[in-house]
Amino acid sequence: MAYRFPLHGVWYVGNGPTFYTDHRWALPEEFAFDLVKLGAGGLTHGAKATRFVDYYDYGAEVLAAGDGRVVLAHDGESEDLSALQKPGETDEAYFTRIKDNQARRLAAGANGLAGNYVMIDHGNGEYSLYAHLQPGSVKVRSGDAVHAGDGIGRVGSSGNSTEPHLHFQLCDRPDPLLCAGIPISFADLNLPFADGPRPLQSGDVVEAK
C-alpha cells in the first residue's frame, strides 16, 4: 500500500531508515522518519531557539497517511524545554545531559517516549504512528474512522524529543514499542534533489502536496 506523506509542504528528513541513522538499531522504528522544516541558513529554528515556537515546524498540521481506524490516541503529555540544547552548550555536555532524560522517559513506557501520539490501523497488519505531538492538539479518539489527509494533530515536542519534529513510522502491531517496523512507500512526493523516484533517505528534501 502506498501512503500519502503525513505533512503539507516542504520538509527535511532529519532521520530516516538509512543504515547510519539511529533509527535502525530499534526494531519498531527501523524504517521510521523524523521530519523537520528548515529555514534560513539550513537551520530548523530562528536565531535564539529557546522556545518551541522558535522552531519553524512547531504547530504544523499532521495528516493521516491513509484510510483507517484510530486504535490509540494519547494526549496530555507536557513538553520539556530543558530537552532543547542551551545556547553555548557544547554537544558533549548536551548529549551527556540528555541521556539521563531519555533513560527516565524509557522507564515511563510508550507515553514517555512517544509523548502525545496517534496510531491508525490501515488493515493488512499495517499501523501508522505519529509521535511527539503538541499537547492538546490530538483531534481523534480510539475508534474514529479517518481518511488519508485528515488532520489528526499538530507537530510538537512531547515525549523523547530533543526539538519539535514529527516522528512517523509504519509497523505491524498496534503498539508503539512492541512492534516491528515496515518500509514505507509514499505516493505523493517530489524529491527535488534526487535523480528520479526512489525511497526516502535521511537528508532528503521533500515536497508534499
Image (spheres, rainbow, N blue to C red):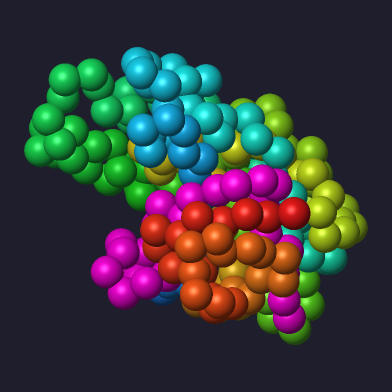
Residue 173 appearing in the image? no
Residue shown at the point (10%, 38%) measured from the top left: 92
Relative depth, front residue between 105 and 44:
44
Q: Quadrant of residue 149?
A: bottom right
Instruction: State whether residue 29 is above or below residue 106.
Output: below
Residue 101 appearing in the image? yes
Instruction: State whether residue 14 is above or below residue 171.
Output: above
Q: Quadrant of the N terminus?
A: bottom right
Q: Quadrant of the C terminus?
A: bottom right
Q: Examine the structure image and report whether residue 23 is included in the region drawn in magenta.
A: yes
Q: Quadrant of residue 112?
A: top left
Residue shown at the point (40%, 62%) measured from the top left: 202
Instruction: State whether residue 159 is above or below residue 82.
Output: below
Residue 77: x %, y % from top left: 55, 32
Relative depth, front residue between 122 and 103:
122
Q: Is residue 159 left or right of residue 77?
A: left
Residue shown at the point (44%, 68%) measured from the top left: 201
Q: Quadrant of residue 122?
A: bottom right
Q: Examine the structure image and report whether residue 11 is included in the region drawn in magenta.
A: yes
Residue shown at the point (74%, 50%) measured from the top left: 63
Q: Which residues are magenta?
A: 1-25
Residue 156: x %, y % from top left: 55, 34
How many numbered markers are drawn? 0
Relative depth, front residue between 174 and 199:
199
Residue 118: x %, y % from top left: 67, 51
Residue 131: x %, y % from top left: 56, 48
Q: Is residue 105 left or right of residue 2?
A: left
